[in-house]
């Protein structure tokens, strides 16, 4: 059994270019930083669409079929779209039990793990909030586990991956200081969101999310909830609605008209907005948005 | 080893002593191995502008009969979806799926109705073959065409397209057998597949002996398996538009028994079914899309029709050579406005209906069509309510008069349990 797997992994070490499929653009960016020219990174989802609702287009089956490894976000963010692609690809290397499969959610501590899982509470994620990459400190943890993952698959280039990771780490650590300084004055500010996808960003910089425009996760806005939210905004005076780029801002606009609250578009991934081209510009944008 | 024994002995003592231990500490706890389970309910309210008793005897001349309403056949009671006027419980569908071991997964789809339990699908699929290869065995929906593999609850309309239901019946090609599929190592999607199936479709394929005299049946059986299917499918993206196209072919023995009908008859021969499908889907954003889906089916049935004497089913009154060349298509356009609202329209047609008995053209009608429109509201991913209107011009009564039947269907489709994957 074990030998069988080793046998499957053998061709990987012989190939100069290993192809790694990743679910979201941010994972692709980290993988590219560490793998550099030794890894072909194939990103499955687009950065400007809802990460929960990626259409399992047949062209993605071909990408999974041709991959030597798969890295996913996990925590059920891909539950609606990745399993059918893996099932149809006929590729043992991308099965979830394979050594060449990495689930990033297992590398970090998840926030807001629900005590009670029931769909009357909306489309909840039983393992906790899956949008953990928006805490920039987590990016380092993820980069380290991706480095170790790549080394485990391609030991020949271990030195290069170590070197690239060190460079990434020192670069990122410098930026963390800059972003911390930029966000210092925002500590304790109250905000509203559409869906709680900034939970990790907020916790990293001390922002307090006091409400969401959707009444429950995955449930579209209702007029009753919107009116209650308007009342809450008038009482607690949060400064901003931090809105994702893929939901319509119609309801947010209505709330803004009634309360004067400011709407700020917050990209969740690379490509969410045209100016967000890489990981650094993603956090540059996020940390500059509320000033 | 000793330590383990001690530990389990300790666990057992604790288990005995304590009231109830948390799941993860129970020694022989197996609940973590429970497969993914979901239950899908489909119910509808139907208004149909036609006489209920007559409707079950309507036919698509030369093609099929009993498409609407419930009817008896072979002693079984068959009913199509939304069969009755008023309320219908179409099914409760129980789905179980899980990994078996590192080499297989298994899926079971069970249709529960008020009258019984039906294994809709039960199959194992390989996961470890590699090289894009996948083998499936058991009972499953054939991957012929586009719609055939999908379950009723993922369709964009409450009923089956006319050409599918007329040629293959309400279950489509749902058979026991084996399937092999290979996804090519190309940058775009390219898949070829083949299936060997038992071949017991009620409308088009079959291999059993037919005849009232069981010792010496009028029509001799055909060796099973007797249905063979092959297909090729491809897909590519042009910016935010996905194109998906496929060609399918099915070839099999036909033994179709209508000896229990008012004018008892049976068909014995060989049939070929050709399919071509094209889906073009454009995405405006994460939730909004426009999907154009079309399929064309052509069938060629070549054999003999046996007309039995209603008073003595062992005697054959006539047995003309029968050749049927029939073709039809459906084309539908569905616009998803957002995650809640969808609207769609569909046009169905059977436009070729050449039936020859002993070389004589039977002059079967070819203006067989159907128009449908629907609007649906989804409260979440797990609950859908759909209002559909059909105008069906494809049915004829027993006097050979073409009917125009209007149907309004209000459908509720509700699911609980494991999150179903979104389909393309």
Image (spheres, coloured by chain):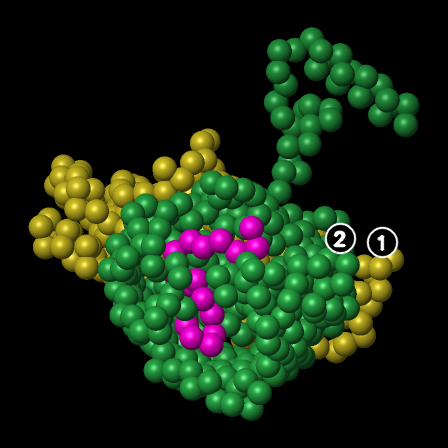
Chain colours: A yellow, B green
Q: Position of residue A44 (x, y in %)?
A: 52, 69
In magenta, the rendered stretch is B60-75
Give the residue number, with chain letter if any, for mark 1: A1
Q: Mark 2 falls on what kind of element?
A: loop
Q: For the residues marked 1 and 2, what is the alpha-carbon distance in whole angstroms?
A: 9 Å
Q: Position of residue B339 (x, y in %)?
A: 32, 58
Q: Residue at x 66, y 78 (%)?
A: B270
Q: Which mark is residue B102?
A: 2
| Parent chain of label 2 | B
> In this view of the protein, which residue sits in the foreground, A51 or B127?
B127
Residue B217, compared with residue B279, is above or below; it is: above
Q: Position of residue B311 (x, y in %)?
A: 56, 60
The reply to whether the magenta stretch includes residue B66 is yes
> In this view of the protein, which residue sits in the foreground, B293 or A4?
B293
Q: Position of residue A138 (x, y in %)?
A: 51, 51
Q: Residue at x 61, y 83 (%)?
A: B321
Q: Which mark is residue A100?
A: none
| Parent chain of label 1 | A
Neighbourhood count class around disc 2 (C-alpha, 10 Å): few under 14, some 14–19, many 20 upward: some
Q: Quadrant of residue B308?
A: bottom right
Neighbourhood count class around disc 1 (C-alpha, 10 Å): few under 14, some 14–19, many 20 upward: few
Mark 1–mark 2 CB contact (< 8 Å)? yes
Residue B109, compared with residue B318, is above or below; it is: above
The reply to whether the magenta stretch includes residue B358 is no
Q: Quadrant of residue B211?
A: bottom right
- Residue B144 in sight here: yes
> In this view of the protein, which residue sits in the foreground, B331 or A34?
B331
Q: Residue furthest right?
A: B2
Q: Residue at x 34, y 77 (%)?
A: B369
Q: Mark 1 falls on what kind of element?
A: loop
């Amino acid at each position: 059994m074990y030998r069988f797997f080793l046998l499957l992994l053998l061709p990987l070490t012989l190939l100069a270019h290993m192809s790694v499929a990743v679910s979201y653009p941010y994972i692709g960016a980290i993988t590219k930083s560490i793998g550099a020219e030794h890894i072909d990174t194939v990103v499955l989802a687009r950065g400007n669409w809802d990460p929960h609702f990626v259409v399992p287009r047949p062209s993605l089956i071909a990408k999974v079929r041709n991959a030597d490894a798969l890295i996913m976000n996990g925590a059920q963010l891909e539950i609606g779209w990745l399993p059918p692609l893996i099932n149809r690809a006929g590729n043992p290397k991308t099965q979830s039990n394979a050594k060449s499969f990495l689930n990033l959610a297992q590398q970090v501590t998840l926030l807001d793990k629900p005590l009670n899982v029931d769909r009357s509470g909306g489309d909840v994620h039983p393992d906790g909030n899956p949008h953990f990459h928006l805490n920039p400190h987590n990016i380092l943890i993820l980069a380290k586990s991706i480095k170790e993952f790549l080394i485990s698959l391609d030991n020949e280039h271990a030195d290069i991956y170590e070197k690239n990771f060190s460079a990434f780490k020192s670069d990122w650590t410098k930026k963390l200081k800059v972003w911390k300084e930029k966000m210092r004055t925002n500590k304790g500010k109250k905000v509203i969101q559409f869906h709680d996808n900034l939970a990790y960003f907020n916790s990293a910089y001390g922002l307090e999310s006091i409400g969401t425009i959707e009444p429950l996760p995955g449930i579209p806005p209702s007029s009753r909830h919107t009116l209650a939210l308007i009342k809450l905004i008038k009482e607690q005076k949060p400064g901003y609605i931090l809105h994702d780029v893929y939901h319509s801002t119609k309801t947010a606009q209505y709330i803004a008209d009634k309360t004067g609250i400011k709407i700020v578009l917050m990209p969740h991934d690379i490509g969410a907005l045209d100016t967000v081209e890489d990981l650094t510009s993603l956090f540059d944008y996020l940390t500059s948005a509320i000033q | 080893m000793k330590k383990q024994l001690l530990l389990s002995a300790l666990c057992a003592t604790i288990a005995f002593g304590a009231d109830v231990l948390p799941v993860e500490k129970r020694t022989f706890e197996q609940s973590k191995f429970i497969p993914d389970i979901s239950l899908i309910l489909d119910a509808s309210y139907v208004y149909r502008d036609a006489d209920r008793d007559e409707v079950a005897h309507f036919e698509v001349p030369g093609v099929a009969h009993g498409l609407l309403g419930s009817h008896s056949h072979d002693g079984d009671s068959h009913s199509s979806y939304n069969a009755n006027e008023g309320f219908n419980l179409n099914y409760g569908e129980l789905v179980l799926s899980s990994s078996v071991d590192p080499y297989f997964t298994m899926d079971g789809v069970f249709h529960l109705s008020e009258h019984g339990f039906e294994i809709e699908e039960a199959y194992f699929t390989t996961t470890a073959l590699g090289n894009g290869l996948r083998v499936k065995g058991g009972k499953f929906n054939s991957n012929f065409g586009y719609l055939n593999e999908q379950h009723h609850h993922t369709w964009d309309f409450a009923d089956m397209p006319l050409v599918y239901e007329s040629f293959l019946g309400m279950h489509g090609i749902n058979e026991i057998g084996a399937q092999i599929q290979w996804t090519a190592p190309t940058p775009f999607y390219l898949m070829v597949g083949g299936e060997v199936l038992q071949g017991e479709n009620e409308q088009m394929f079959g291999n059993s002996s037919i005849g009232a005299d069981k010792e010496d049946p009028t029509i001799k059986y055909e060796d099973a398996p007797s249905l063979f299917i092959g297909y090729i499918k491809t897909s590519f993206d042009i910016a935010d538009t996905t194109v998906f196209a496929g060609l399918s072919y099915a070839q099999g023995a036909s033994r179709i028994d209508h000896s229990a009908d008012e004018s008892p008859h049976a068909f014995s021969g060989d049939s070929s079914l050709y399919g071509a499908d094209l889906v073009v889907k454009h995405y405006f954003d994460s939730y909004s899309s426009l999907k154009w889906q079309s399929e064309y089916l052509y069938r060629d049935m070549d054999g003999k029709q046996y007309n039995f004497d209603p008073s003595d089913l062992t005697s054959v009154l006539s047995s003309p050579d029968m050749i049927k060349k029939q073709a039809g298509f459906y084309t539908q356009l569905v616009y998803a406005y957002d995650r809640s609202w969808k609207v769609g329209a569909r046009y169905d047609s059977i436009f070729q209906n050449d039936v020859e008995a002993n070389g004589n053209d039977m002059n079967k009608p070819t203006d067989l069509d159907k128009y449908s429109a629907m609007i649906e509201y989804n409260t979440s991913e797990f609950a859908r309510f759909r209002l559909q209107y059909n105008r069906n011009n494809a049915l004829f009564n027993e006097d050979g008069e073409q009917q125009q039947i209007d149907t309004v269907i209000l459908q509720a489709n509700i699911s609980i349990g494991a999150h179903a994957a979104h389909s393309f």
